[in-house]
Amino acid sequence: MKKNTYKGTPISPGIAIGKSLLLEKQDVAVYRIDLEEQQVESEIQRLKEAIQKATAQITLLKEQLSDRLGKEHGYIMDSQLLMLSDKLLVENTIDLIRKEKVNAEWALNETAEQWTTIFENMKDEYFRERVTDVEDVIHRVMANLAHINVHDLTQVDEDAVILSYQMTPSDIVELQNTRVVGFVTQIGGKTSHTAIIARSLKVPAVTGISGIDDIAKSGEIVIIDGYEGIVIVDPATTQLREYQNKKNYYEEHSRVMLTQRELPAMTKDGRKVVVQANIELPEELEAAIRSGAHGIGIYRSEFLYLSNPDRLPSEEEHFVVYRKLAEKVYPYSAIVRTADLGAEKFTPAMGMNHEPNPALGIRGIRFCLQRKEMFKTQLRALLRASIYGRLKIMFPMISGLSELRETKAILEESKEELRLQKIEFNENISIGIMIEVPSAALSADLLAQEVDFFSLGTNDLIQYLLAIDRNNDHLSYLYDPLHPAVIRIMKYVVDKAHEVGVKVGLCGEVASDPQNLIVLLGLGLDELSMNPVSVPLIKHMIRSVDYSDAREVLEHCLALATAREVNEYILEKVNQFFPSGFFAPKGPGPSML
């Protein structure tokens, strides 16, 4: 029997059904051509004209994206425009043409290889995924040099699903006003600009499908399940009917949930939970606001450092981003996590050496305490921006009281510098810490005396607590947020914080999984923060249950001995509380469990 179902990684939710369209980019063959001396300057001019044309093309795409989704998303294309004016790209290529007297395509290809090697060798996922932007820009300039037109998808006259080795950010922008309803790729990532734009445009997408060229013939029906990461080629009638029903069902209930997105997340018996969004790029801010998130639960500031590998960001660059964040989110609050660098997240400008065990090495607050001036640059910018809204500062990887006090002392030094310069800031800015190390969790009673809030960073807390590398495929089955030890330590943290009036949020991926919600509610968490896409559903679910029921479920879980027992029990209770599936507010319908 022919295999027709494939499992990949979901990067943009939704269900799409259409005829397959195999998309192959027309690569430009690159040959070295040696030039005569008198040809060099005209070759440089040819390169400059190709770059100018690419700049005009991307500027147009930026305008289209801004018109459709707002200026915030137009900024995504700014990174490509910056690349086109980058000295490394332009001047190095020109130097190569002059020095070796070679054609522009060859010189550009040599420069591009240097660029992509730098990005591909970065261990940080966010940084690696910027390779797509680099390749997008280079391909466009190459196509202009060769006078090749990019594909024209406006001619597609029926619903189509693109199958391609890779999709670039500009590819996705060009899907607007076409009949393309989704795409499947072999490579790509959740934090790539391609994925961000796809989610914003609500284009379902799955990546990580190997052998993309062989799984379907052009014109075959393809189903994309952007929730589960499933791709079905040439579906049976029953499969087609099932997914058409799911598609209709989801779209209807998404519409209902979106109309209710501004409603508070309050349980039926009156307990309010603040649901916020996690973002790591300024471009995601607009989507977070539109999702109905009541604030930003964590803004990961590392992008400011990782997007400029050759230098550290200035205080002004920090300030501009934080001020915009504060103003856009107001009247809600935005929590900025100070640089969680080190481990695998560093650039040449930071001068870090690879460590034998980076997860337990110089990272998070440890790194910042060793780079005091760099740390103060960020803190001063945060303080300056604090008068433009409700900014809060959160420190990562705090492991104990001494570390916290040392951190607070540097914050006070930064405040004093601003006072001496007569620069205004919020003297009472809230500060908090991430609880992501077992020692911090077990010191919750001590730490709570000296901060305004806690945020449970479950991604790392689970890793450290259970001694599991969450990226190790051989151990991933042990990584379980419903492990009894995880539930018990989270309860301890919440209880100790609440004893002294300190609020506790949770900002890990755990918060966006509907199956975990009952336990998280039962713990008494004050805030939940997640990816923007999940916000409407989680708020809807909170409004569908009683807090008292969630407390009872939690108490039962605390008496269970193994993760398997907890998971089986939770599944039973989820089916009881949501008998029609997570997307069904009432009545029958296909379960999305």
Image (cartoon, rainbow, N blue to C red):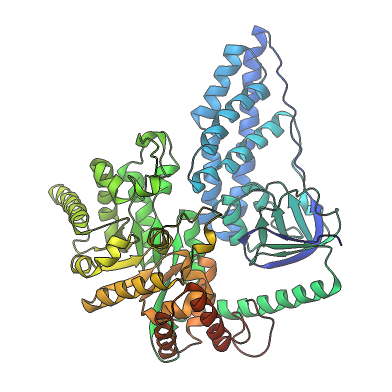
Q: Most extreme residue toward the front, as rendered?
A: 561
Instruction: Specify whether 316 is left or right of 537.
Output: left
Instruction: Report the quarter where the C terminus lies.
Output: bottom right
Residue 528 in view in this figure = yes
Q: Indicate whether 566 appears above or below 41.
A: below
x then y, percent, for residue 234: 84, 63
Q: Residue at x 49, y 39 (%)?
A: 122
Instruction: Report the quarter where the N terminus lies.
Output: bottom right
x then y, percent, for residue 174: 69, 51
x then y, percent, for residue 45: 63, 21
x then y, percent, for residue 403: 21, 54
Seen from the viewer's position, the closer of residues 201 and 346 is 346
* Quadrant of the image occupied by residue 324: bottom left
Instruction: Specify whether 590 is left or right of 561.
Output: right
Seen from the viewer's position, the closer of residues 277 and 287 is 277
Q: Indicate whether 592 appears above or below 194.
A: below
Residue 331 in view in this figure = no
Instruction: Specify whether 144 is left or right of 480.
Output: right
Q: Residue at x 23, y 58 (%)?
A: 400
* Quadrant of the image occupied by residue 589: bottom right
Q: Residue at x 59, y 57 (%)?
A: 67
Q: Indicate whether 511 appears above or below 155.
A: below
Instruction: Specify whether 350 is left or right of 209.
Output: left
Seen from the viewer's position, the closer of residues 349 and 499 is 499
Q: Most extreme residue toward the top, as rendered?
A: 37
Q: Indicate whether 174 appears above or below 333.
A: above
- Numbered disc total: 0
